Image (spheres, rainbow, N blue to C red):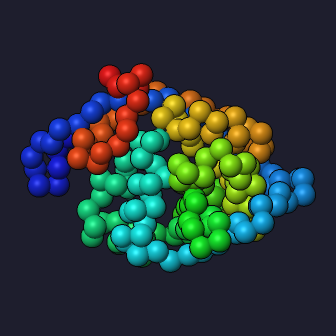
Amino acid sequence: MITDLGFLEPVTRMQVQVTFMRMDQPPATPARALPPGWVLENDVRLSLTQYRTLHFGVGRNCCWWMRQVLSDKALASLLATAPIKVGLLREHEHIRGFYELNLGDPQNINLAYFGLLPEAIGLGVGRAFLDGVLRQAWAYGPQSVRVNTCTADHPRALPLYRQMGFEIIRRVDEEWDVPDRLGLDIPAHLRC
């Protein structure tokens, strides 16, 4: 990969299948409650360092690299000017997950990022967390809510999205050159 400075840097090439999904109606079931002591915070402002730390913590095992490769200046500009809303999942004072809604197309809101920190996976909060995020997205009045997942994401991501009402639109095979300097955990079966 050629960097902004014009030199090559070591990368790991990986092959993923990206699944594009859409939900055309808000959840019809009653809202799912988070366990006692857990809360969803919507529209939070994070510092650049907080965002990077949280994004890396949630996305490290899922190869979330596209934001991590941005310079501080580019990422700060994006966070300050892009039509995005960031939210957190907290257990008491501890952050356990985060999400990001892209409102660039208000009629087709994109759930750009959604995930739990590793220590929160398996605690039974993912479904209620996603339910709360989807209700927040639908509160903006779109015609649809979209999400993408890929074969690098947690294996339960795609089934969970389908259970929550997302339908598959299409699948695309992609190859990514992920900079080694990011320190992401790229599974052996996805390496080219």
Residue drawn 36% across and 70% down? 49
Image spot of residue 92 (x, y percent): 65, 71
Q: Is residue 175 visible?
A: no
In the rendered image, which quarter contains the C terminus? top left
Q: Quadrant of residue 131?
A: bottom right
Give left or right: position of 118 versus 29: left
Image spot of residue 104 (x, y percent): 54, 63
Who is closer to the viewer here, 129 or 96? 96
Give left or right: position of 137 versus 81: right
Image spot of residue 23 (x, y percent): 73, 47
Eyeballing the image, is 192 above or below 51?
Answer: above
Residue drawn 68% across and 49% down? 123
Mark count: 0
Q: Is residue 19 visible?
A: yes
Residue drawn 10% across and 50% down? 6
Eyeballing the image, is 190 above or below 180?
Answer: above
Residue drawn 52% across and 69% down? 83
Q: Quadrant of residue 41?
A: bottom right
Image spot of residue 165 (x, y percent): 78, 43
In the rendered image, which quarter contains the N terminus? top left
Who is closer to the viewer here, 46 or 4? 46
